[in-house]
């Protein structure tokens, strides 16, 4: 891959993320652009790429397991009355161009293609903003337009018969550590209490990995190499639009650390021809383990409400 394929996001001159536009991945992983590694300002890695437990988890991005029967998530497809099934139904998200590209963000155009046909066209806007000397915000918006002549619908394993598995949409795979991260909202705590809720914000707090990508001042940060780091970290996810706040959160902590939105929680989500679906999630990336009050204050600063 060339440097053009892997722009580096910067906050106050520090590299905090790398965006891979054209990953070389097998079809089974539903190839798609992703952000990885993403780090705190101190350099602690807070994303994972193709981990052993779920090879199709690719850092930060947009992944949908069912678009009119096509799998843009990767891995097996949940089939009603059969369970997880290996199918030759994987789609891919293809980066076509940057409409805007700056050190602190970009606007990209993508095509969602399956079975030789384009189903959706995406406009993706990503921006990195400094909040404090120990926290920054990743502002991630995606707009999906149905470019076919007929209606499409978005589903999930939950809508296909697997309770509690309504994943699909924005998804952040965090780094797996020896201990599971803490999960909390303004008024709930623990994976069981938080999963499936429609909280304004949700926090995932880890203990710090022994290795992470990129010391802020190291040359390795430029190349995407790994550097020693550590310390606790907190990710605070906030829905920044009314539609996004209506989507329940998908949360995993004990099995693996990951947070995403649920576009299709209990029912399939229709997208008519020419219709555009828009979602925006702002994620606070902080060094240290934040308390509720600190998390809420940083969300207000990041989202402006």
Image (cartoon, rainbow, N blue to C red):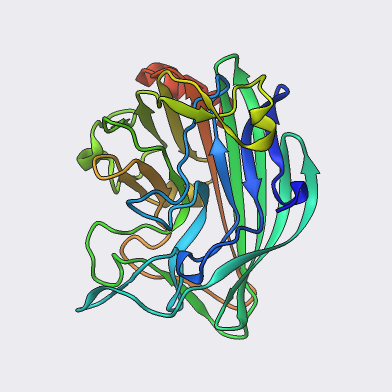
Q: Position of residue 296 (x, y in %)?
A: 44, 23
Query: How many badges with numbers are in the image?
Result: 0
Q: Position of residue 243 (x, y in %)?
A: 49, 52
Residue visible at 80% across and 48% down?
100
- What quarter of the picture does the C terminus occupy? top right
Residue 126 left/right relative to 226: right
Residue visible at 60% across and 21% down?
131
Which of these two is toward me, 267 or 98?
98
Residue 300 left/right relative to 116: left
Occupied quadrant, residue 288? top left
Residue visible at 36% across and 17% down?
291
Query: Does residue 304 show up?
Result: no
Q: Position of residue 139 (x, y in %)?
A: 60, 39
- Above or below, 62 against 238 in this view is below
- Above or below, 194 against 86 in this view is above
Q: Position of residue 71 (x, y in %)?
A: 44, 71
Residue visible at 34% across and 60% down?
265
Which of these two is toward me, 239 or 254?
254
Which of these two is toward me, 246 or 13?
13
Occupied quadrant, residue 254? top left
Query: Does residue 14 show up?
Result: yes
């Amino acid at each position: 891959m060339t440097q053009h394929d892997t722009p580096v996001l910067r906050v106050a001159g520090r590299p905090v993320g790398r965006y891979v536009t054209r990953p070389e991945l097998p079809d089974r992983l539903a190839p798609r652009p992703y952000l990885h590694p993403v780090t705190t300002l101190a350099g602690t890695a807070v994303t994972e790429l193709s981990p052993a437990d779920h090879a199709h988890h690719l850092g930060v991005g947009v992944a949908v397991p069912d678009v009119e029967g096509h799998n843009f998530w990767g891995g097996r497809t949940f089939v009603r009355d059969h369970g997880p099934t290996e199918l030759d139904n994987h789609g891919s998200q293809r980066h076509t161009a940057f409409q805007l590209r700056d050190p602190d963000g970009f606007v990209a155009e993508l095509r969602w293609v399956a079975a030789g046909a384009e189903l959706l066209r995406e406009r993706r806007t990503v921006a990195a903003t400094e909040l404090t000397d120990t926290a920054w915000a990743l502002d991630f918006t995606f707009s999906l337009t149905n470019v076919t002549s007929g209606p499409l619908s978005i589903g999930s394993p939950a809508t296909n018969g697997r309770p509690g598995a309504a994943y699909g949409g924005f998804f952040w795979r965090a780094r797996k550590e020896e201990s599971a991260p803490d999960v909390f909202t303004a008024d709930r705590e623990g994976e069981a209490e938080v999963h499936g809720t429609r909280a304004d914000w949700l926090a995932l707090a880890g203990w710090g990995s022994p290795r992470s990508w990129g010391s802020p001042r190291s040359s390795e940060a430029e190349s995407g190499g790994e550097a020693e780091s550590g310390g606790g970290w907190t990710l605070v996810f906030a829905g920044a639009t009314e539609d996004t706040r209506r989507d329940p959160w998908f949360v995993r902590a004990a099995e693996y650390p990951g947070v995403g939105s649920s576009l299709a929680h209990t029912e399939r989500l229709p997208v008519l021809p020419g219709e555009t679906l828009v979602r925006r999630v702002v994620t606070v990336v902080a060094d240290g383990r934040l308390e509720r009050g600190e998390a809420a204050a940083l969300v207000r600063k990041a989202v402006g409400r």
